[in-house]
Amino acid sequence: MCLFFNCTGSLCFILILFTLPHLTCTMKCPNGCQCNPDGGVLCVGYTITDIPKQLPVNTYLLVLTKSHLHTIHPQAFHVAPQLKSVQLSNNDLSTLPARVFSPLTTLEELHLNGNQLETIASEMFDGLVGLLVLDLSRNKLTSPPSNVFNGLINLNFLNLGRNSIKKELPSDLFCCLPNLKNLSLKFNNLHHLHPQLFSRLTALGMLFLNDNKLQNLPEYIFQGLGQLFTINLKNNHLQTLPGDVFLSNTALRALDLSGNPWDCTCSIRGIARWIRHNEHVVTDKEDVICHSPMYQMLRTIGSLRDEEFNFCDATRVPSYFPTQNDLHEPTQPFHTISTDRQRSGSATMPPTTTSTTPVSPLLCVLWSNPVIT
């Protein structure tokens, strides 16, 4: 609404001067939009099919949502280079011209979540050196270009969650984000992570990797991330983790590990020890349970003790020629026959019971190596 003054004299002139920066006239507010005198423009509805060609000169926030917007004209943002925040969430955007946002040199927030984007050009965000927040979640992205985030040196928040990102990301995808504090990759199709994927994210505080298909993690994947205080790894395909994988994350306060098919055999010993010593960090420790082997099912990993893994350190050089000790001093569990399938006292070794008849190692060799005549 335009404001009109019915007054004369210097007092009225002064009043107009002080009021003019806050005026937003109806003729400048696009059809189907609401314009806030403080600089916000809200455009909602399926009648919206393009970025408004005219915006009030003081507009710093543009929210365009729930529309039939499929793409954006390459020069759409030339009319409002002063924008600080652009929110294009929940539209039908499927393609974007390269550098369409480049005129917005003072842009701090860009929300593109909830669209149909499958690809983005490597130069899409060129010139956005002041960008702090970038939300690309809930799209159909599969393979982000390795240099697409280059130049976003001030970015704090990056959301790539709920896309269709392929099995592995480029190793240098996050190479040039020195100020990134929050990264979400949840609900994708990730199977593996390159050992150097996060190596340069030294300011990272929160990392969400939950609900992927991660099968393992490199031992040094989180090395050097001294400010990382939240890691979410739940609902993946992890069976074990290196015991030292979180060793350098001294600021870690919240770790989620549930919903993984943990294999509680010898390889779990290191991470089980770490969990015992850092129970206050594992927020879902009661749900971090063994899925295999069968005699360990439903046991929490944090309850596994070091001494239960002593048998993992046993080294035995196989020989086809038994020694005198082998013949007269049988050792459990290698030289006994078990007929009782009940669970033994050990929680880590397979359940065994002592047979009354020791079996000679020579016979074991003969049974496992039948002579073909």
Image (tube, rainbow, N blue to C red):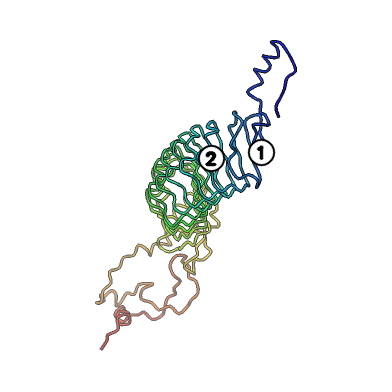
**Mark 1, residue position:** 31
Residue 91 image point, x, y percent: 59, 48
Callout 1: SS: loop
Q: Is residue 18 above or below residue 221?
A: above
- Answer few, some or many: residues within 10 Å of disc 1's Cα (few below 14, many 20 plus, some between 14 and 19): few
Kind of residue indicated by mark 1:
Asn
- Name the quadrant of the N terminus: top right
**Mark 2, residue position:** 110
Residue 247 image point, x, y percent: 41, 47
Relative placement, left or right, of 136 versus 354 is right
Q: Is residue 47 above or below residue 268?
A: above
Q: Which sits earlier in the primary sequence, circle 2 or circle 1?
A: 1
Q: How many marks?
A: 2
Callout 2: SS: strand
Relative placement, left or right, of 18 versus 365 is right
Residue 32 image point, x, y percent: 67, 40
